[in-house]
Image (cartoon, coloured by chain):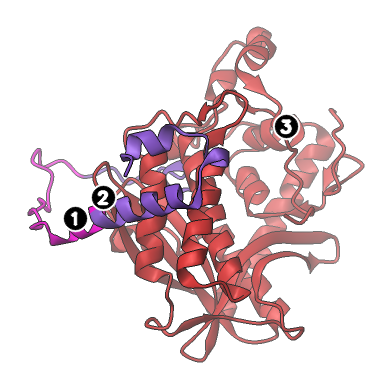
Chain colours: A red, B purple
Amino acid sequence: MIEIERKSFSNGIQFAWDSTSLTLAMECPRKYYYRMLRNIVPQSTSVHLIFGGIYASALEYFYGLRAVGADLEEAILLTVKKAMIDSWDSETGQPIVFNDAKKTRVTLIRTIIWYLDQFGDEDEAAIKTHHLANGKAAVELSFALELTDDIIYCGHLDRVVEFSGSLYWMDQKTTGQTLGPYFFDGFKMSNQFMGYTWAGQIMFQAPVRGGIIDAAQIASGFSRFERGFASYTREQIEEWTKNVEYHVKTMQGLTALGTFPMNLTACGNYGGCPYKSVCSAHTSVREHVIASNFVHPATVWDPIVPR
Amino acid sequence: MSDIATLFARDPLKMSDEDFSAIVQKFRESRTAFTAAPVAKTPTKPASGKKLALDLDLGDLGI
């Protein structure tokens, strides 16, 4: 077994999980093995991850500034500056290559500005950032909580808000698809969002009802936004924790055995598994495929390490 | 005022606050123009009559 130094692992077995590693394990043990144990990713990062990552980081930055009292226009300007810098490759002296018709650097900055103009001033929506008991704004909250005696569940809440007398986590998503009920329906069964709700209820000792999802449709000529809600009953969250425990223990067992079966029904999901080229190759050449087309990411994915 | 292409070609670490303000203004102008434009009717069914694909691109969702 390949050993990589990570705090979320003990004796080669992962004990601290997050929605990313959990979803990998649920999708396909072999995919989990390549991403979490071998720590390899495709050479070219998905444009969706680049775009979505900079977008999420920008909005998190904006709300952090507003939480400490920054003026709206000042916060927008600083956020745009950050996003422009984050989308610039200082090594090449050129913008990051997005290689997509809709998700480009221009549409990224446009989407940020249009979103902040529509939602940035929250007084009209009667949403406000929640503050912790110590007075700090509830933004950029990393958590690592005991799911069971031997499983830690981790994550990162961008922001917790107060709305209509209840607490909600907030998250944002970007897509090239048209927004509508079908889009938000897809989040009803979301490890990420169920995990946020579970964590929020523990961290705040208050009824975190669920979350508010701000979705952005990215088109060539425009960006459009929809706000949706995801709510879960206490029973659904309890069921989710049992589900997590089952899948984590299953994956831990497979890891201990050094056996990682493929889930052949998952190869075509979400635009195609990034490791399909490895699994579909003859066993004798898979390491060559990995050496040619995959790299170790700059940072190791370690769920228990706070962002 | 420089156009968007010129502004986007510059190293942002060397840009001024006025440059970033110009970018914000340009995109606000484009939003005003987009909001004011008549909304085109979009078809509710694919012309082919085939069902739409049900798989969501998780990467497309920014997850």
Give the foreground label among 3 and 2: 2
Name which residue lies at 42% across and 75% down.
A121
Position of residue A285 measured from the top left corner of the image (x, y, whole percent): 65, 8
Q: From the viewer's perspective, tell me whether residue A45 is left or right of residue A179.
A: right
Q: Which residue is mark 3?
A: A39
Position of residue B43 measured from the top left corner of the image (x, y, whole percent): 9, 50
Name which residue lies at 77% across and 83% down.
A134
Q: CA distance from mark 2 to mark 1?
A: 7 Å
Chain letter for mark 1: B
Q: Judging from the image, what secondary structure is the residue with disc 1 in?
A: helix
Say which label, 3 or 2, has the lower sequence index: 3
| Label 2 close to label 1 by CB (< 8 Å) | yes
Q: Is residue A284 above or below residue B14?
A: above
Q: Is residue B56 above or below residue A173?
A: above
- State which region is magenta: B30-51
Chain letter for mark 3: A
Give the foreground label among 1 and 3: 1
Q: Which residue is mark 1?
A: B34
Name which residue lies at 52% across and 34% down.
B11
* Mark 3 crowd level (few <14, some 14–19, many ≥20, 10 Å Cα): some
